Image: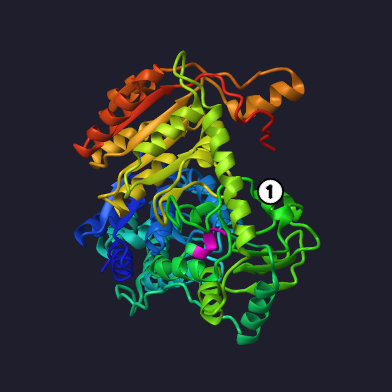
Amino acid sequence: MHGGEIVAEVLHAHGVPFVFTLSGGHISPILVACKARDIRVVDLRHEVNTVFAADAASRLSGIPGVAVVTAGPGVTNTVTAVKNAQMAQSPLVLIGGATATVLKGRGALQDIDQMRLMRPNVKWAASVTRLKDLGPVLERAFREAVAGVPGPVFVEAPVDLLYPEAVVRDWYIGSSTGGSLTAKLTRMYLRHHLDRMFAGGGEVPATTVSRPAVASPAARTLRRAAAMLQAAGQPLLLIGSQAVRDPARLDDLVAAIGQLGVPVYLTGMARGLLGPVHPLQRRHKRREALKEADMVLLAGVPCDFRLDYGRQIPRRARLVAVNLDAAALRLNRRPQLAVRADPGAFLIDLAGRMAAHGGADGAWRDRLAARDRDQATEIAGQAAAPGGLLDPLELCRAIDGMLADDSTIVADGGDFIATAAYTLRPRGPLSWLDPGPFGTLGVGAGFAIAAKLCRPASEVWLLYGDGSLGFSLAEFDSFVRHGLPVLALVGNDASWQQIARGQVEVLGDPVGTGLRRSDYHDAVAGLGARGLLLDDPGQTAQILDLAKRSVADGQPVLVNAHLGASEFRKGALSI
């Protein structure tokens, strides 16, 4: 077997259903071999989106996503997405092509020091120089991606390891002609190099499929956490992305939350875990709730900027932090109990230990629920009446009313997406995809492609700001070519509004934040999708319904929604 076939065999053995790529001569054997083994090859229009797609695929399936990109610019184009995956703790395998081993450092096409570039942005990286090492290195890559704190890994595969040995020998020896001593010595060196490179190769190692290892917390740790929870009168539970990294245990996690009986806020990938309506889930006024809590359990949520570096939690409150990352356990705050464990497994085990616990004080739950209802009513009152351009709040409320039970929401943007995050109610577990703590714009198309591939029956909504749409507009061509009917909507306010809000208020100048109210609906039509213009609030329901029917018929669609000014997020700063 040549190297491309070995790569494909390892991916197939690990249950990888598709690879995301942009074609390149350095990686062609991998793509051809994957297709021959019924691994779907999904080629996109920019390498950064291949890694975004691999990231989302790993989050939704529990299997590390795989992106395969060509050498040089192909690899460098992925760096932002790789760093986003690292910070989001998404396990994925990035395979990068490279120049031929014998030409390394000699000025070959697209030859750069890729390892030096990638190592700071991944958990683990390796460059393969012998065919017999290719399979074992890939096996280790899958193990490393899911071990401990999950994350991306990088494997560099030089082009001469991937093509058939006979072809490579012809490249090397066939190009070396002449009877001079120099020519003879060159051929001798090349034969020696090739013999070493291919020696013992062509075999695929026995595969051990790696899944996240879940270590049960120590019994004494669970006892201590249970005692703290039972003693609390006003406990609060915050659940983050780490808790939902194992799709197979989500039903058990939901049951555990109900058994604990503690009011809960969901963040990151945990959004939607409890569905749109759950008696324990709170959506609004989290800062106020934290200030009043006497015990806070952070399940996969670090005390970073999202919790004001821990200042939202009062010093008098007992703090329990559960996280896979040892550094995150004590980031900015030292908890009374720090547990390095899988947060989802910890909550399940804790609920089992507290089977007879009656949950949080009823008055505390009722007060938070009432505050939640009041805030929802206030938000509804802030939405503008029809007339003029669309109000972002009213548009998001309309979208929420039309979400199908099996819908998946991909969020890619700033001001409009922040409004959507505050308003929309994801319908189920793993039904909300956002970039994560890196705050990266441009994840939308890659995430949506993976969502539709992982969940072909799901109604995938891709919500854009008009700034973020510019990063992946060309991928509507990919939606069409691969038959992926995604329902996209761009909140078009002709501005980088999230930046403009703070910049104008503080500095008095909108420079660099203005955009055109461009005809994005016409642009996607030119790429083969359907474009719809929504610039009349009175037409919102009709246009959204038309968009839903278009994707149901198999056609990707973009709704270009013209937004008017809104004071809903007045005072927001993006720093």
Mark 1 crowdedness (10 Å alpha carbons): few <14, some 14-19, many ≥20: few
Coloured how? rainbow
Could you tell me which residue is drawn at 55 percent across and 34 percent down?
A: 379
Q: Is residue 124 above or below residue 284?
A: below
Q: Is residue 386 above or below residue 308?
A: above
Could you tell me which residue is drawn at 76 percent across and 62 percent down?
A: 333
Q: Main secondary structure of the magenta part?
A: helix
Q: Can you see residue 413?
A: no
The magenta stretch is 239-243
Q: Amino acid at mark 1?
A: Arg
Could you tell me which residue is drawn at 37 percent across and 44 percent down?
A: 448
Quadrant (top left, top right, bottom left, bottom right) of the C terminus? top right
Q: Is residue 359 above or below residue 117?
A: below
Could you tell me which residue is drawn at 31 percent across and 48 percent down?
A: 452
Q: Residue furthest front?
A: 363
**Residue 407 position within the rendered picture, expressed as x and y whole percent measured from the top left:** 34, 46
Specify the quadrant of the image occupied by residue 191: bottom left
Specify the quadrant of the image occupied by residue 562: top left
The residue at which mark 1 appears reads as: 287
Q: Is residue 72 magenta?
A: no
Q: Can you see residue 385?
A: yes
**Residue 163 position within the rendered picture, expressed as x and y whole percent measured from the top left:** 30, 59
**Residue 78 position within the rendered picture, expressed as x and y whole percent measured from the top left:** 48, 47
Quadrant (top left, top right, bottom left, bottom right) of the N terminus? bottom left
